[in-house]
Amino acid sequence: MNNKTIANLMIGATISISSAASATVIDLTSWESDGVGSWSVQAGNDSVLQTTNGVPGVFFESGSNARDTQISGEITVNESGDDDFIGFVLGYQDNELRSSSSDYWLIDWKQSDQYWGPFGGTGLEGLALSHVVNGSVEASFWTHSNGINEIARGNNLGSTGWVDFTTYTFDIVHTASLIEVQVNGNVELSVSNADAGVTEFTDGAYGFYNFSQAQVEYAGLTSVVLPPTSPTSAPEPSTLAIFALGFAALFSRKIKKK
């Protein structure tokens, strides 16, 4: 069994744990925004609508450390007049959005390719994970460059944009060793800290992200606390993987005896 197989078993175990655990409704009434955005918490306090078409903005729980958490919910763009970025931040700290010494993780999803002259390049259609280490240059968020370091693109949605007036479910796992994103039940991103080239994924808040896109609703939000994990330089066998290896060896011996 190779390391990739073992890693997949570990990821499956993580998702199984989070699915079996009790989900808590996320109360957004104490959350706040950084950057540009008009974030209106909706009835029930577990949904928020962002209505501004502007430069990057995030909505998050100030001062929280929410690593070892899975967040789930729905995302919908309720207009057809634009085609830009929606998404999430992980490991985020207060006032870090446009800092020259940022250290957080950006999951953004653009509807279509678009060249924007003032930003000096093309924003690419699709879903991506990036490490933000210098957010001081606004144009870098558009092109994923110069401090917005793209790490991976979605397995199925890496070059496919979101659709107007369409609701998508999302599940995002964030631990020290794993960032995993599911959209409509399909794993789009599954990146270890080793894959990303970092010692560990930073702790901090999770939050919602918009760039030049209005009328975005994040709804029905819940969270599940996960067992803490330790970052590794290479995947280590889980209990399930060790059991599988032992069973394979035993089966092989029986075949040889026959």
Image (cartoon, rainbow, N blue to C red):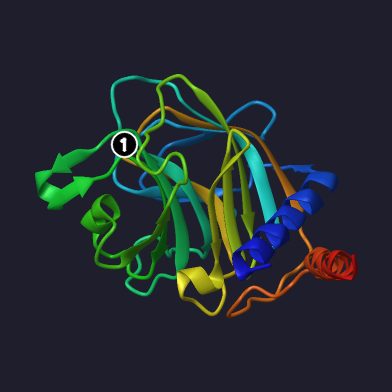
Residue 233, by quadrant, is bottom right
Asked if residue 9 lies left or right of residue 178, the reply is: right
- Asked if residue 65 shows in the view, the reply is no
Tell me if residue 72 comes above or below residue 193 in the rendering: above
- At 34% from the left and 33% from the top, the residue drawn is 111
Q: Locate the C terminus and report the quarter of the image it occupies.
A: bottom right
Tell me if residue 235 comes above or below residue 5 in the rendering: below
Asked if residue 115 lies left or right of residue 45, the reply is: left
Residue underneath mark 1 = 84
Residue 2, by quadrant, is bottom right
Tally the numbered discs: 1
- At 43% from the left and 39% from the top, the residue drawn is 157
- At 81% from the left and 53% from the top, the residue drawn is 17
Q: Position of residue 253 (x, y in %)?
A: 86, 71
Tell me if residue 101 comes above or below residue 76 in the rendering: below
Secondary structure of the residue carrying numbered label 1: loop
Asked if residue 74 lies left or right of residue 9, the reply is: left
Q: Position of residue 192 (x, y in %)?
A: 56, 66
- Asked if residue 79 shows in the view, the reply is yes
Asked if residue 33 lies left or right of residue 183, the reply is: left
Along the line of sight, the residue nearer the viewer: 241 or 177: 241
Q: Position of residue 180 (x, y in %)?
A: 59, 54
Q: Which kind of residue does numbered mark 1 sit on?
A: Asp
Tell me if residue 53 comes above or below residue 123 in the rendering: above
Q: Position of residue 136 (x, y in %)?
A: 28, 65
Along the line of sight, the residue nearer the viewer: 40 or 138: 138
Along the line of sight, the residue nearer the viewer: 22 or 28: 22
